[in-house]
Image: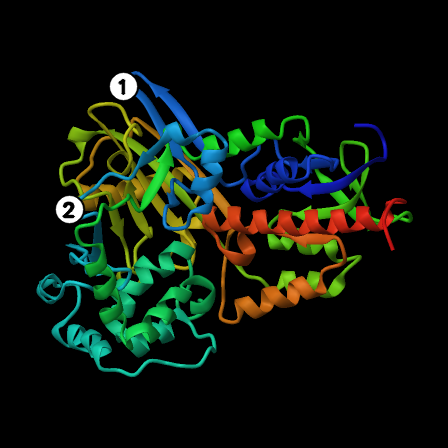
């Protein structure tokens, strides 16, 4: 690019959020001059898939997200637009998809447990996951009054109020807080699972509402809950990057963002000529956006700095299936915080989605770090591998060394949606300078569908502002 080239929109950050903005801008407003600048040597951010060739065959290993939720339509709609529908694969069905680890014992999640409440009472009452008193307290939800105000509360407070302490420890904390790698005592119910408050009000009971929803589904054709792409979720990032080719730039490390004398903003890079842009999209981690904004918008910078994160990672290990002498019945093992341990969960990737491992082999993925096992983030790669191999030996009877392994670390990569998160994000939006927006996982959802939705909405607002500006500047405007 030429020195001082002027853009209508500069997008800083080439993860799914930034790439979605660039893609939407090209389709919604092709007249705008745009540029996307990513500081690393690859697009996609935390969406990272690796195909590993071995003598046994190919493995597909995910570094972060391995699927997207179908009930939220925005990722699927984008995939359809990109022409990737033929690459979609559904999650496999399993009779007992999730197993819990309690006091060293593997206990299947009771049949009919939806999110955190039972929709089938007999399997729930027979399960050893909760004590008799814990089950009785859970069923008190059927008689308790609903909360009617709109104040936020933590996930822990919500579950204690409706279902009791044991349901929090052995259902909500591992299954729901685990999605966000979060502490349920701090986690905002309105920012993460607002539908639970809606269900509470609908029939004055979570259990009643979930059972009613289950009855309406009986007999209806059920779509898979999750889907992925044949070559891994990286295919989404690759397709977005290809669709915006010519407007995207790698290894573009931003050093400074300053107001430009002629309007808009000047962006200086460590290793390329500067550009100016009327609008800037910060599709970056909140801490990076805060550093960028500190000289020009200290209030917004301070608010962004208050958004917490946690560090987490995963290690994938491949084995011959025969080496797993005590296999899991489904494709997931979850470790509640009460159980302790060096890891948070195990996914059997090769059972969860087809094509992740060759015939006769299995691919396991262990999650660590976050709020449950933060100490594992301090281990070096060799110590981490040995620790996880020891855990697999004890739980699943795996003795031999893995055929291959891959370790991924995401320092400060997990946004935390603490109580009051919605108000904090509204305050950030109000404090942002004109023509600068932030978007991505720190704000309105950590899953790929939520990121796509927010990035699309940010793009629509940008286009409206630019067209309003162009109409105001046009010598042909009336009035």
Q: Residue at x 15, y 29 (%)?
A: 322
Residue 424 at least partly seen: yes
On the image, numbered disc 2 is attached to which residue?
Answer: 95
Residue ID for mark 1: 56
Name the image quarter holding residue 254: top right
Q: Residue furthest front?
A: 478
State whether residue 25 is above or below residue 418: above
Q: Is residue 447 above or below residue 363?
A: below
Q: Residues within 10 Å of mark 2 (few under 14, many from 20)?
A: few
- Which residue sits at x=27%, y=71%? 206
Q: Position of residue 443 (x, y in %)?
A: 56, 57
Give the vertical position of 179 relative to 191 (above or below): above
* Count of numbered tags: 2
Nearer-the-camera pick, 17 or 217: 217
Left or right, 184 with respect to 452, comes to left
Q: Is residue 48 visible?
A: no
Of residue 282 and residue 177, the one placed in the foreground of this image is: 282
Q: Position of residue 361 (x, y in %)?
A: 23, 27
276 and 392: which one is in front?
A: 276
285 left or right of 354 in image: right
> At which x and y percent is residue 291?
70, 54
* Closest to the observer, 251 or 394: 251
Question: Which element carries disc 2, helix, strand or loop?
Answer: loop
Q: CA distance from mark 1 to mark 2?
A: 28 Å
């Amino acid at each position: 690019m030429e020195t001082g080239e002027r853009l209508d929109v500069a997008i800083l950050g080439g993860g799914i959020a930034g790439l979605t903005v660039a893609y939407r801008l090209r389709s919604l407003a092709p007249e705008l001059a745009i540029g996307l600048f990513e500081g690393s040597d690859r697009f996609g951010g935390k969406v990272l898939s690796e195909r590993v060739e071995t003598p046994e065959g190919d493995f597909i290993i995910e570094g972060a997200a391995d699927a997207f939720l179908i009930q939220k339509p925005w990722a699927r709609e984008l995939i359809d637009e990109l022409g990737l529908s033929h690459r979609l694969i559904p999650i496999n069905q399993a009779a007992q998809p999730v197993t819990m680890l309690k006091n060293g014992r593997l206990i299947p999640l009771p049949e009919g447990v939806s999110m955190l409440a039972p929709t089938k009472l007999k399997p729930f009452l027979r399960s050893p996951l909760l004590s008799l008193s814990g089950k009785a307290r859970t069923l008190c939800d059927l008689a308790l009054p609903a909360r009617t105000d709109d104040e936020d509360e933590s996930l822990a407070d919500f579950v204690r109020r409706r279902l009791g302490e044991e349901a929090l420890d052995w259902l909500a904390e591992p299954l729901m807080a685990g999605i966000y790698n979060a502490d349920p005592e701090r986690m905002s119910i309105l920012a993460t699972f607002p539908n639970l408050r809606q269900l509470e009000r609908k029939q004055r009971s979570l259990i009643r509402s979930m059972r009613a929803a289950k009855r309406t589904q009986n007999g209806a054709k059920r779509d898979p809950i999750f889907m992925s792409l044949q070559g891994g979720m990286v295919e989404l990032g690759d397709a977005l990057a290809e669709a915006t080719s010519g407007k995207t730039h790698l290894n573009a490390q931003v050093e400074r963002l300053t107001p430009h004398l002629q309007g808009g903003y000047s962006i200086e890079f460590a290793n390329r000529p500067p550009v100016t842009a009327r609008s800037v999209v910060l599709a970056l981690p909140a801490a990076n956006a805060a550093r960028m904004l500190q000289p020009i918008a200290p209030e917004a910078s301070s608010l962004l700095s208050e958004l917490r994160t946690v560090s987490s990672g995963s290690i994938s290990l491949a084995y011959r299936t025969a080496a797993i002498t005590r296999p899991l019945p489904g494709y997931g093992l979850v470790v509640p915080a009460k159980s302790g341990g060096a890891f948070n969960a195990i996914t059997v990737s090769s059972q969860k989605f087809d094509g992740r491992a060759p015939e006769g082999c299995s691919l396991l993925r262990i999650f660590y770090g976050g709020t449950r096992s933060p100490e594992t983030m301090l281990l070096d790669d060799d110590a981490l591998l040995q620790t996880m191999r020891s855990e697999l030996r004890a739980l699943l009877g795996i003795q031999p060394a893995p055929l291959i392994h891959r370790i991924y670390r995401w320092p400060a990569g997990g946004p935390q949606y603490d109580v009051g998160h919605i108000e904090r994000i509204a305050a950030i939006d109000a404090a942002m300078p004109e023509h600068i927006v932030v978007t991505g996982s720190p704000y309105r959802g950590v899953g790929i569908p939520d990121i796509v939705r927010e990035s699309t909405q940010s793009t629509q607002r940008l286009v409206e502002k630019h067209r309003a500006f162009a109409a105001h500047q046009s010598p042909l405007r009336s009035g």
